[in-house]
Amino acid sequence: MTSTLLHRPDAPTEPDAPVMAAIVQDRYGPPESLRPATVPRPVVGPDQVLVAVHAAGIDRGTWHLATGRPYVARLAGIGLRRPKNRVAGRDVAGRVVAVGDGVSRFAAGDEVFGIAEGSFATYAVADADKLALRPAAVAVEAAAVAATSGITALQALTEVGRLAPGQRVLVIGASGGVGTFAVQLAKALGAGRVTAVAGTANAELVRAIGADEVIDHRREHIDARSDRYDLVVDIGGRNPLRRLLRVLAPTGTLVIVGGEGGNRVTGGAGRQLRGLLLSPFVRPRLTAFISREHHESMDALARHLADGSVVPAIGARWDLAQVPAALRALESGVTSGKSLVLVDDTDADPATA
């Protein structure tokens, strides 16, 4: 899936000011509201790092930022009337080209991955605390899609879900970005049995990444069997709370990740809130959370990537100009795993490019 990026004049700049290719968005809307443009290169701040972007990742969060939905997200700081960050994209992998005065963890030339503001561009600025060194054994493409989904899955399992070795884990939405990481991380962290919920087309994918058992949600509900789970990680799921309670062990934990479905105002956040309100009155523990973007989680994730216990499932590859099409594919549900955007593939791993 390749095409040529068209550089469009975007805004007047100083004659000698450095510019870059980027995907920008001036308003909330469908994926087609994003467009290629030539824009000024960002300037690094005191606690920031300037990264020459090799590749970037796409997940559901990218879609929410583009559409501005659910509307409650705008109140949370993404911008009320238009996107706060004009250049789109967050997951990033690339090479450090400059660091701010307060940065000591990185130096020019370091290969890094993490979360930036505006990774759909040839250069992006990131807070130093949101980056980690890319292990030498990890390909650029794998690192580019890892940060957001990987740390969300890791925190859901450990910090919130309190996964203990030998426990039975159910991952709902196992074929998506966070789900493919959750299945692998659960196995790596010692889960006794991992059951994945996915559609018919993705059953083999989730088995290949380590699921011990697969429930095809197109053929049966998760509570159709007598199995009970110590930890249920529901990623953007649409199962009502009563059904989730039926599959939990008496002392089990439910972690609701994301908020797909629902209405345009609150999205799926209403289900999370109902779970938190119900938790004091039922025996299982019902939780929800928003992931914490910090290098400590990324460093832990990097160790799993480096030892091969977690291998990002890259579903589709796109070039920079195709970001709107990539978001449309994500919206339609035809993608699995993580979508990769190749920005500068000169340093890409030939075996995976």
Image (cartoon, rainbow, N blue to C red):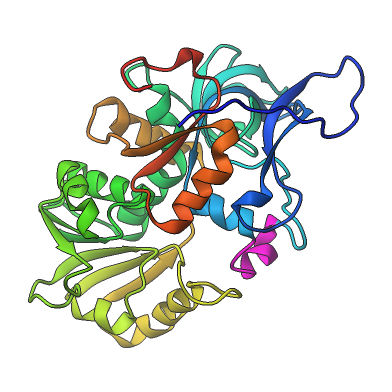
Q: Is 70 covered by the magenta stretch?
A: yes
- Choose between 170 and 265: the one closer to the eye: 265
Q: Give the magenta part as a residue range.
A: 68-78
Where residue 234 appears, as percent x and y from the top left, is 32, 65
Location of residue 158 with respect to 144 vertically, above or below = below
Where residue 140 appears, as percent x and y from the top left, is 42, 23
Spot the residue most to the bottom: 281
Viewport quadrant of the N terminus: top left
Specify whether 166 is left or right of 292. left
Location of residue 200 with respect to 151 vertically, above or below = below
> Residue at 16% across / 42% down in the picture?
208
> Residue at 44% across / 74% down in the picture?
272
> Residue at 39% across / 79% down in the picture?
275
Is residue 239 visible to us here?
Answer: yes
Location of residue 309 with respect to 247 vertically, above or below = above
**Image quadrant where residue 277 sits:** bottom left
Q: Main secondary structure of the magenta part?
A: helix
Where residue 130 appears, as percent x and y from the top left, is 55, 37
- Choose between 295 and 242: the one closer to the eye: 242
> Residue at 68% across / 32% down in the picture?
22
Viewport quadrant of the C terminus: top left
Specify whether 173 is left or right of 316. left
Q: Is 43 covered by the magenta stretch?
A: no
Number of numbered discs present?
0
Where residue 85 appears, as percent x and y from the top left, is 71, 46
Specify whether 167 is left or right of 278. left
- Choose between 60 and 43: the one closer to the eye: 60
Spot the residue most to the left: 226
**Image quadrant where residue 40 sits:** top right
Specify whether 296 is left or right of 169. right
Is residue 291 visible to us here?
Answer: no
